Amino acid sequence: MKSLVCSSYGSPSDLKIIDSPIPIVKSDEVLIKVHSAALNFPDTLTIKGLDQYGLTLPFVPGREVSGTVEYAGKNVLLFKKGDDVMAHMITGALREFTSVQVENVFAMPKNMSFNEAAAFTVAYGTAYHALINRASVSAGKSVAILGASGGVGVAALQLAKAFDCKTIACVGSDEKADFCQTQGADFTINYEKEDLKLRLKKTSSDGIDVICDMVGGKHSENSFRSLSWEGKLLVIGFASGSIAKLPLNLPLLKGADIIGVFWSTFSTKHPKIARDNMNALTELYTQGRLKPSIHKTFQFTEAHKAFSELSERRVKGKVIIKFT
Ligand SMILES: NC(=O)c1ccc[n+]([C@@H]2O[C@H](COP(=O)([O-])OP(=O)(O)OC[C@H]3O[C@@H](n4cnc5c(N)ncnc54)[C@H](OP(=O)(O)O)[C@@H]3O)[C@@H](O)[C@H]2O)c1
């Protein structure tokens, strides 16, 4: 089978497609014939050697796929050969067949395409864990989303809207702001040219209830200063490349919470809740309240172009790599 391999840290053009053996499946794993894979921001870091898992070279990048079960390990009861599934992992998505721990494999809803399914687990799983498990959002709350046109951003926007929250999409260009209006934003703010703190305060006079922060840098503190009494900052990512340092008088003055969100570790530690979450998400998809937004689809032979698109901040929604 063909695999995309990172054998030295560098740029997307250093990735190579090679022939490799089909993975050997452990008793609690599923072998998936991959139809589509989606990229996530952390994939752009892994190929530069900047990931948090300390991956050893060589490795196959990519952390989510959709496809068809080719073989189920002997302890796997949930799936059988021929089932259409979506799945996530830390690495190993970008190959024709991939083996995945059964805890991280989910049935595809009947009306979902393979491209949508490839784009579903990581972004929506993270957004749901953040908004529901960690922040317990409810109808009427104001939710500001930094990096709202990205993968996790669009998922958070659609989910907050599905829970009848007031949604404020914060992005880096007017084009992305327009896009977010099509994804459920009640308000949009371009943080590259507007004062984020003032504009956030204007949208909600009592302050913002929940901030989903995928970007970090100066935007973390600027948005935190717009929080309501007992507001919540969800720390999800640092796509700007800069980890903010907050003065600790700010959470004291607002009685506010700073809440860490780490979905992959949560999924490993709480697989039952993670599966319940995915069931709730597929139900919302089936009701038409969630819809993965596909920015562009690349053939497997052009996978390196998808990495460039994402790392150069050009993507609205998700980029897909197709194998068939
Ligand atoms: N904690 C968790 O469990 C978890 C899970 C998944 C992802 N994450 C993290 O969440 C963040 C978003 O992931 P994603 O897959 O949604 O990424 P994405 O699709 O690339 O979206 C990231 C967004 O960040 C903004 N951004 C600001 N400065 C940027 C820069 N210098 N380079 C690239 N983007 C920049 C971009 O929007 P603008 O151009 O509008 O600013 C972009 O849309 C990442 O930091 C990722 O590591 C965390």
Image (cartoon, helix red, strand yellow):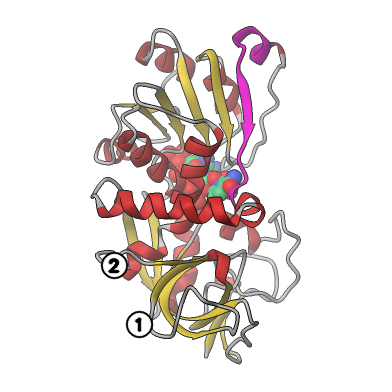
Q: Is residue 253 in the magenta section?
A: yes
Residue 84 in the figure: left or right of residue 136 = left
Q: Is residue 59 above or below residue 291?
A: below
Name which quarter of the figure residue 140 lies in. top left
Q: Position of residue 136 (x, y in %)?
A: 49, 31
User: Ligand 1: does it lie within 8 Å of the C-beta at label 1?
Assistant: no
Residue pictured at 57% horizontal, 73% vertical: 100
Dot label at residue 324: 1
Residue pictured at 52% horizontal, 87% vertical: 2
User: Is label 2 in a helix, a strand or a loop?
Assistant: loop
Q: Nearer the viewer, residue 270 or 315?
A: 270
Residue 177 in the figure: left or right of residue 61 = left
Residue pictured at 40% horizontal, 16% vertical: 199
Q: Position of residue 208 (x, y in %)?
A: 45, 18
Residue 38 seen in render: yes
Crowding at label 1, few (<14), some or many (≥20) Cα neighbours within 10 Å? Answer: few
Q: Which residue type does callout 2 highlight?
A: Ser
Q: Give the magenta part as a residue range.
A: 250-263
Q: Position of residue 132 (x, y in %)?
A: 48, 37
Crowding at label 2, few (<14), some or many (≥20) Cα neighbours within 10 Å? Answer: few
Q: Earlier in the sequence, mark 1 or mark 2?
A: 2
Q: Which residue type does callout 1 highlight?
A: Thr
User: Is label 1 in a helix, a strand or a loop?
Assistant: loop
Task: Look at the image and tell me in which quarter the C terminus lies.
Answer: bottom left
Q: CA distance from mark 1 to mark 2?
A: 13 Å
Q: Is residue 67 above or below residue 141?
A: below
Which label lies toward us, 1 or 2? 2
Residue pictured at 37% horizontal, 11% vertical: 202
Which residue in the protein does label 2 denote?
A: 113
